[in-house]
Structure formats: C-alpha cells, structure tokens
Image: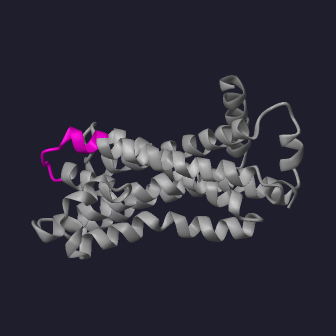
Amino acid sequence: MLDQVLTIASKEVKDSWRDRRAVLSAAVYSLMGPVVVSLVSVAVQGKQGEGQSVLIAMMSVFTLVSAFSGGMNVAMDSIAGERERRSLLPLLMHPVTRLDVLLGKWLAVAAFALTSLALNVLGFALLLRRVPAWQISFGLIALSLLAAALEIWVSTVCRGVKEANTYLSMLVFLPMGFGMFMVFSPVAGQLWWNFLPVAGQQLELEASMRGGQLDMFRIVFLTLVTVAVAGLALLAAADRLEQDDVVYG
C-alpha cells in the first residue's frame, strides 16, 4: 500500500512541477508576504509598540497563507482537473484502491504546501532577519497537512477546474480571515484559541516573534488537534471519491 501511495505522489509531483506557471504563481504567493512586510517595516522603522505588533501580525498571517496557497493549484488539477478531463475513471481502473489514490494525491499537495511554507520562512529570514522558534515547526507542518487535506476535499466536491479555482481561492483566505479576527476581536485572547487549528498557529507564531515563552504542551496538543482535523478532512474526501457521481461525472 505504501509503495503505491508513494508512486502516485511522485507522479503527481512530477506532473505538477512541469506546470511552470502554477509553480511560479505559488512561489510569488509565498514571497509576497516577506516583500510586503519588509516594505511596511521601512515605514514603521524606529517605532516600537503598536508598529512592531502590526509587523508581527502581518508576518504570522502571511506565513499561514503560504501553507494554503502552495498546494492550491496541485489540488485543483489532481481531482477536479482529472474529473473534467475524464481521466479520473481510467486511473481508478488500475489495481489500486481509491484510498491509495487519494493519499498519494494528498501527499503531493502537502509537499508543495510545505515547500511554499519553507520558502516564506526563508524570505522572512533573508529580508527581515526574523525566524520563528524551531518548536513552531511542529504546528506549521501539521497546518500544511491540514491545508492539503482541505484542498483535496474541496477538489472532490467541485465538478471542474473553474469551480475548484473559485472555492480553493476562498479557502486560501481562511487564515487571513482568522488573522484579522485574532487582531481585532477581544475574545481572541481566551486560552482555548491556542488549541484551534490556524488560530493556534498564529498565536504561537506571534508569541515566538515577540520572544515570548513557548509552551510545548500547547504546541504538541495543537499539532495533534490539527492532524486529527486533517484526518477528518481526508475521510470526507475519501467518502466523496467512493461516490459514483464524482468518478463518472
């Protein structure tokens, strides 16, 4: 089973890498955050307090967005695109389970999501000399897996590339919406937000950028919750892939 999943994932990565425009688009999304924040940092240079808080909040939001934007095009083409091209059914006629196909495509999307996230962090490190603490990597990796799972699920729901592009673009703005809510809502400071995927990662990122004390229990618990939600999204996607209307259109 593992060999089949890895073979499918490898094929999806190679096919997606050939689409240079999609790869370039994902790279631009990843580096847009560091560039924008570096320009804003020039405007608030020398200011403390509120100015630095705005920079940290922007860095956190752009980092989370990169985890969602990196695999969007891959997820769009891997299910909805193949369904539109009528190539999904021939793929499933091979001696491989539908779950293996789904997991292979998910790993491919997750690989691009993690690469986009790493590129974003590298951009912040080079332009602003700021890197989050290594402990945050657990939660960020889990968030990339969740983003890939959600994007795969959305792709199974959509009937074609245009529909998938619409809904996946909306999904990419999920961390941005959470970020704005966390900045302006007074209830965002409550403890239970630290254990909610996306919101928890943002709070941990902001705490790390401010040099605050990180709680490993919170990070580990948040990572486990995020992975669990990713698993639920994959189960939902697997259930969709078992339905004949998804395969036959």
The x and y percentages for residue 217 are 22, 40
Does residue 210 appear left or right of residue 38 in this picture? left
Q: Position of residue 216 (x, y in %)?
A: 22, 38
Nearer to us in this view, 124 or 100:
100
Determine whether, in the image, residue 87 is placed left or right of residue 2.
right
* Residue 116 seen by the camera: no
Question: From the image, which quarter does the C terminus lie in?
Answer: bottom right
Residue 192: in sight, yes or no? Answer: yes
Q: Residue furthest top?
A: 3
Q: Is residue 217 magenta?
A: yes
Q: Residue at x 42, y 41 (%)?
A: 141
Image point 50% across, 56% down: which residue? 68
Residue 82 as seen in the image, left or right of residue 73? right
Q: Position of residue 74 (x, y in %)?
A: 66, 51
Q: Position of residue 6 (x, y in %)?
A: 66, 29
Residue 228 in magenta stretch: no
| Quadrant position of residue 47 | bottom left
Instruction: Please provide the residue range marked out in magenta.
Output: 210-220
In this rendering, the answer to whether 211 lies above or below 107 is below
Left of 52 or right of it: where is 29?
Answer: right
Image colouring? one colour
Q: Give whichever of 2, 240 is nearer the camera.
A: 240
Position of the N terminus, as image quadrant, is top right
